[in-house]
Image: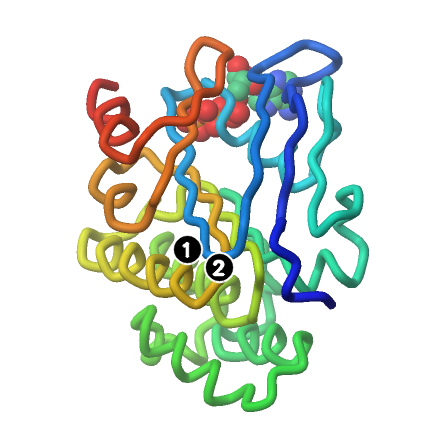
């Protein structure tokens, strides 16, 4: 893969919605390496719909979203290597432990020191004591931590998270926000939907505000204020 590609994602006149009906848009956007973009707005504004459309999980009503210079195809090798995504859904193998889930991800992405990467995430997400547990034995916050650990463990050029702060305690939220900032500093671009103004302010360097079907580019302060007004 050409990791020197300056343009990780481009949206041209993108309108997101269902069955030909607009939910929000149009959006013109270019995401470059190291850019850290928050997406904010009230419940049902269309943030998740926009995010799914940006990453190619659903067809746009109009316009297009392009990742790494080719039309978005989430089954392509380049896409899977470059893009790490967590939406608000639990997806686990019932008979694999916490540690085995992470080992599977590390192996699947051909990491050079897979167990070291697994251990790092078990420590960061405070899952060491739960390493042998099956997903059904975890708390909802621990399941969230495991999904985030899986997304952060593997290398990526574009990390896409839908409300990652959900079900996390305040200490973990703050640690995750700082981690996301670090991830962006290494050159990975972030697209993150959030309802937490402090979380937003800790990781983002710009914001998309989704409101009344429109999408506007705003600063982090304005984005945080828009959340707080909610
Ligand atoms: N599969 C679907 N089919 C049709 N409409 C949908 C579908 N999923 C969501 N919607 C509608 O699209 C609109 C935007 O929903 P979306 O989930 O994108 O909002 P959101 O901003 O992410 O909300 P929240 O903050 O509550 O997570 C809502 O009116 C919702 O009812």
With respect to residue 182, does 8 lie above or below?
above
With respect to residue 133, does 44 lie above or below?
above
Q: Quadrant of the C terminus?
A: top left
Give the labeled residue for mark 2.
Answer: 147
Q: Is 203 in front, or is 162?
A: 203
SS class of the residue under badge 2?
helix
- What residue is at 72 percent from the left and 56 percent from the top? 79
Task: Give the Cα distance between marks 2 and 1.
Answer: 5 Å
Kindly check if marks 2 and 1 are in contact, taking CB atoms under 8 A apart as contact. yes
**Left or right position of 222 against 216:** left
Give the labeled residue for mark 1.
Answer: 144
Give how far across and how far down residue 141 sits, in percent. 34, 55
Give how far across and how far down residue 143 sits, in percent. 43, 58
With respect to residue 22, does 208 lie above or below?
below
**Left or right position of 7 against 177:** right
Quarter where residue 180 is shown: bottom left
Q: Which mark is residue 162?
A: none
Q: Is 110 in front, or is 214?
A: 214
Q: Is 75 in front, or is 207?
A: 207
- What residue is at 35 percent from the left and 27 percent from the top? 218
- What residue is at 52 percent from the left and 31 percent from the top? 48
- What residue is at 57 percent from the left and 64 percent from the top? 156
């Amino acid at each position: 893969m050409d990791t020197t590609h300056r343009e990780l994602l481009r949206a041209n006149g993108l309108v997101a919605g269902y069955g030909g009906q607009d939910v929000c848009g149009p959006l013109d956007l270019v995401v470059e390496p190291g850019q850290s973009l928050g997406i904010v707005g009230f419940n049902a504004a269309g943030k998740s719909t926009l995010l799914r459309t940006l990453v190619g999980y659903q067809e746009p009503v109009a316009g297009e979203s392009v990742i790494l210079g080719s039309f978005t195809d989430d089954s392509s090798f380049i896409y899977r290597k470059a893009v790490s995504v967590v939406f608000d859904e639990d997806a686990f193998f019932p008979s694999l432990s916490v540690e085995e889930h992470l080992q599977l991800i590390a192996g699947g992405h051909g990491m050079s020191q897979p167990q070291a990467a697994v251990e790092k995430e078990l420590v960061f997400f405070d899952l060491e004591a739960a390493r042998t547990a099956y997903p059904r034995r975890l708390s909802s916050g621990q399941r969230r931590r495991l999904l985030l650990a899986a997304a952060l463990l593997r290398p990526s050029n574009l990390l896409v998270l839908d409300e990652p702060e959900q079900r996390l305690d305040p200490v973990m939220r703050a640690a995750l926000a700082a981690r996301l900032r670090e991830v962006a500093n290494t050159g990975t671009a972030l697209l993150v939907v959030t309802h937490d103004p402090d979380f937003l302010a800790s990781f983002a360097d710009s914001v998309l505000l989704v409101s009344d079907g429109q999408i506007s580019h705003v600063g982090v302060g304005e984005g945080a204020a828009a959340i707080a007004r909610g």
